[in-house]
Every structure is written in C-alpha cells, then in structure tokens.
Amino acid sequence: MLKLATKLAPTTAALETAFRAGFRHAELYLDQAILADWPGALERARHYPFGYALHFPNRPELTADMLRGCVELYRQLGCRSLVIHQPMFDRYAEELLRLEPALRLGIENHKLSPEQFAAWAERGPGLTLDVEHLWMFTHKGAPLSVVLATVQDFLRRWGDRLRHVHLPGYWPGCREHRPMYCGRDLVFPVLSLLAEHRFGGLIVSEVSMEFQNVAELTMDVLLFEAWRQRYDPLLTG
C-alpha cells in the first residue's frame, strides 16, 4: 500500500498541523541549525506517530557533529530513507555511510536534461524521484503523456533503486510546490504507476510554507484517499 507523507521542518507547530490534517508519514527538512540541536528535533518528532524520512541539508559546511546528528536522527526515528542532492552526496556520502553503512540514501533529480536524467538514474545507488523536477526541468513544456511515459520507463529500468518520491501538484506555467490537489491530472496516474510497481517508500506532497496549514494539507489527504478508493490495485488484492 502506498504511503502519503508531507515535508516539514521538525517544529511542534508543523508536526501538529500535519497530524491534525491526517498525515501519518513525514519527511523532515534539515539544516545546520536543526542538526546543531538534533536531540530537540528528535524529542519533538517522537511525540507524533509518524513514519519518517529525512531530507539532508542543501547547503555545505556541515560539521562532524552535525553529520553524526543526522545519522542519529535517522537511526532513532527508524527512518525509511535520507533524501540528498547530488552535490551533497558527492561531498558527504562517504562519511555518512561510514557512520551508518545501512543508510538508505536517495539522490534527488534536479535540473537535468533527458540525457542527464538517464545518467543520474543509471549511476545512483539509491534514488529519490522528484516528479515536479522531471516536468519542470527535464521535460519542460512537454505534454503530460511524455512525463508519464518517462516515469513508467524509469520504474521499469531503475525502480529497484527507488527509495523516495516527491509528488507536488505541478502543472506547466504554475508555481512549484503546490499541493497535490492542484495537479490531480498528474498525481493520479503517477500514484497508479507507483502502485503497480508496488513501491514501498514514501510519496511526499512537497508544498511551500503558505500551503502548510490544516485546510490545505487535509485537501491532499482527501485526494489521496479518493485515489485509493478508485485506483489502488492493492486494495483489491
């Protein structure tokens, strides 16, 4: 069964909002300040019955203590994956894996051409597929059918290394990081492809701060439930 998550900073207010909206999984955004006080983030996160993944900081210059804090959060929250951008993977993966060899790193695709996208998928030991980035940058201006065909091909060729998925409600010409319900025509078929592939990681409604309120987040939970009732093949065996 697919698992819906939201992305947030590990603050009490953000965690409470996500819980009240009906989410039971979360991707925790990390930065230097959060990792400098990782025990506090751990204590707050443990107050909520979420299944967790982590998003590694996007900026470099992390101390050894911060790296250890990231690994401790991963361990103690029983995280499913650690999302990381390519430059940070290149710089910190060796040390992170030395601290925790079982770390499930998922390198995220970003501003890649179609050829670069294929190379990223081919070489990455673990992958985070950002569907919004795929449409915004890799297939900019292409019809939805092209994006869906690429997702299907990606799952066929590299799905065994897929750790995590970002799936906001993107549509060409609109702002990024909108709620899922704003891009139903993209979200529903991608969810169906992931279900057919029996994807076991988290699918994240990655939204901007302005949408991180109970009303907007609840709309995404309701959309996901509507999809499950109509499309999820796992519900019927």
Image (cartoon, helix red, strand yellow):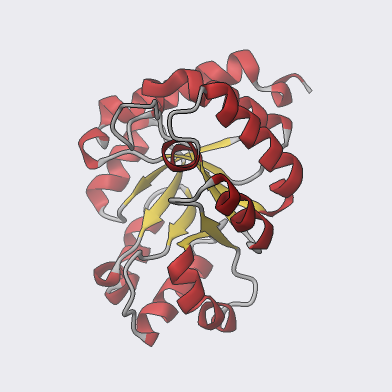
In the image as oriented, which residue stretches furthest toward the bottom?
A: 64
Q: Relative to 4, say whether 31 is above or below.
A: below
In the image as oriented, which residue stretches furthest toward the top?
A: 230
Displayed quadrant of residue 66: bottom left
Displayed quadrant of residue 56: bottom left
Give the side of residue 170 with respect to residue 113, left or right.
left
Q: Position of residue 35 (x, y in %)?
A: 32, 72
Displayed quadrant of residue 152: top right
Placement of the C terminus among the 4 image quadrants: top right
Q: Is residue 65 visible?
A: yes
Q: Relative to 180, say whether 9 is above or below.
A: below
Residue at 31%, 56% (x, y): give it: 10
Give the total of numbered labels.
0
Q: Where is residue 20 in the image (x, y as percent from the top left)?
A: 33, 34
Q: Position of residue 136 (x, y in %)?
A: 41, 37
Q: Relative to 6, say whether 143 is above or below.
A: above
Q: Where is residue 16 in the image (x, y as percent from the top left)?
A: 29, 43
Identify which residue, 60 or 14, lies in the foreground: 60
Residue at 39%, 86% (x, y): give it: 64
Give the side of residue 195 with respect to residue 34, left or right.
right
Identify which residue, 181 or 65, lies in the foreground: 181
In the image as oriented, which residue stretches furthest toward the left?
A: 210
Q: Is residue 73 visible?
A: no
In the image as oriented, which residue stretches furthest toward the right?
A: 237
Identify which residue, 135 or 162, lies in the foreground: 135
Give the side of residue 110 with respect to residue 236, left or right.
left
Placement of the N terminus among the 4 image quadrants: top right
Residue at 27%, 46% (x, y): give it: 14
Residue at 35%, 26% (x, y): give it: 218
